[in-house]
Image (cartoon, grey):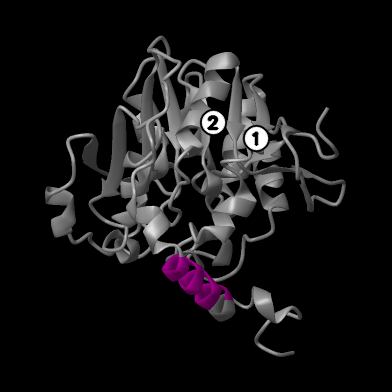
């Protein structure tokens, strides 16, 4: 067997090269703030993300793209653990963090991977706070109208969660893509997703803590979070907007090359590949008595 997939375009070194070339071709696009748009909600907009030690030094373009949104967030919570739980590596504080804007707040905490990205931020607000929480990934620059699209969708339907990417689980538990707007079973965090603080409910931290011993839950946090939303009766919906969609994300070089390094969750997170089968999440949650998503197409 060759050390690359049948389709050579899917070989990680080729994907990294393609991403790097797209990024260079679009640098001028990313250097300019978006023209401001009219804000249609009074809710506080909070973006949350985390970073591994290896990626922290190249994180700066991500929050910069979030600040350059047509509707900038009120707060950006950057959750940085003291020690990276996967490797025991300590984080080296980067100089650019000392120069970042007042909109960005850095929170040092214990690593609860992969929930470090959003659970600590969600816990900082009560269920009654008028807050829209937007979860962002650490290797994606976000298109200028991403927040406008997500936040306006949540404002119109606060009982639902919305993302730019999502899929269903087929009968064989394979991904069934959704190329259009509509309900999905799983929202994918890489493209960004949002929900009101009330929709996220109470008890999320305990739920993720129960998942911690199960490696498939660590590697498939999108499924774990979507199952939590399903358990709380929160509909998950994908949005395909002309100005914010996965095709444009790729065309504009928004995906940074570090997304295909060995520490990426989809590559096993710098460890053995065991646990990559997403059916392990279902088995774990069934064992814990909290599996709520069904396979097959969304209603």
Residue 181, quarter of the rendered image: top right
- Decide which of 283, 90 is in the foreground and name it: 90
Q: Quadrant of the C terminus?
A: top right
The magenta segment: 15-25
146 relative to 158, above or below = below
Q: In the drawing, does residue 105 fall left or right of residue 8?
A: left
Q: Which mark is residue 239?
A: 1
Front one among 183 and 175: 183
Write the residue at 63% across / 37% down.
241
Which residue lies at the image location 54% right of the left edge and 65% below the top edge? 268
Q: Position of residue 39 (x, y in %)?
A: 41, 20
At label 2, counting other C-alpha atoms closer than 10 Å, the crowd grade (few under 14, some 14-19, many 20 or more) is many
Per the picture, the main secondary structure of the magenta-coloured stretch is helix
Residue occupied by mark 2: 149
Q: Is residue 111 visible?
A: no
Q: CA distance from mark 1 to mark 2?
A: 8 Å
Tally of numbered discs: 2
The secondary structure type at the circle numbered 2 is helix
Residue 294 in the image: x percent, y percent? 79, 34
Q: Residue at horizontal 42%, vertical 27%?
A: 37
Residue 22 drawn in magenta: yes
Is disc 1 placed on a helix, strand or loop?
loop
């Amino acid at each position: 067997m060759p050390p690359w997939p049948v389709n050579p375009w899917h070989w990680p070194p080729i994907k990294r090269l393609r991403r790097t070339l797209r990024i260079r071709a679009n640098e001028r696009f990313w250097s300019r703030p978006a023209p401001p748009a009219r804000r249609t909600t009074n809710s506080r907009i909070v973006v949350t993300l985390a970073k591994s030690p290896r990626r922290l030094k190249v994180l700066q373009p991500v929050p910069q793209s979030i600040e350059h949104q047509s509707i900038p967030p009120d707060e950006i919570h950057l959750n940085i653990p003291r020690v990276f739980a996967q490797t025991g590596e300590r984080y080296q504080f980067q100089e650019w963090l000392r120069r970042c804007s007042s909109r960005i707040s850095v929170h040092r905490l214990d690593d609860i991977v992969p929930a470090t990205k959003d659970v600590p931020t969600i816990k900082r607000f009560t269920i009654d706070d008028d807050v829209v929480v937007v979860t962002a990934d650490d290797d994606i620059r976000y298109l200028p109208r991403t927040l406008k699209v997500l936040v306006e969708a949540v404002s119109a339907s606060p009982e639902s969660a919305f993302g730019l990417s999502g899929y269903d689980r087929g009968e064989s538990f394979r991904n069934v893509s959704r190329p259009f707007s509509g309900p999905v079973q799983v929202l994918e965090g890489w493209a960004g997703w949002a929900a009101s603080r009330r929709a996220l409910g109470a008890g999320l931290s305990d739920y993720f803590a129960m998942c911690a011993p199960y490696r498939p839950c660590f590697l498939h946090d999108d499924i774990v979070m979507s199952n939590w939303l399903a358990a709380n009766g929160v509909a998950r919906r994908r949005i395909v907007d002309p100005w914010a969609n996965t095709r444009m994300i790729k065309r504009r070089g928004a995906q940074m090359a570090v997304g295909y390094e060995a520490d990426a969750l989809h590559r096993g997170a710098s460890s053995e590949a065991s646990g990559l089968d997403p059916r392990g999440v279902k088995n774990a949650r069934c064992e814990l008595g909290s599996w709520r998503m069904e396979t097959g197409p969304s209603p």
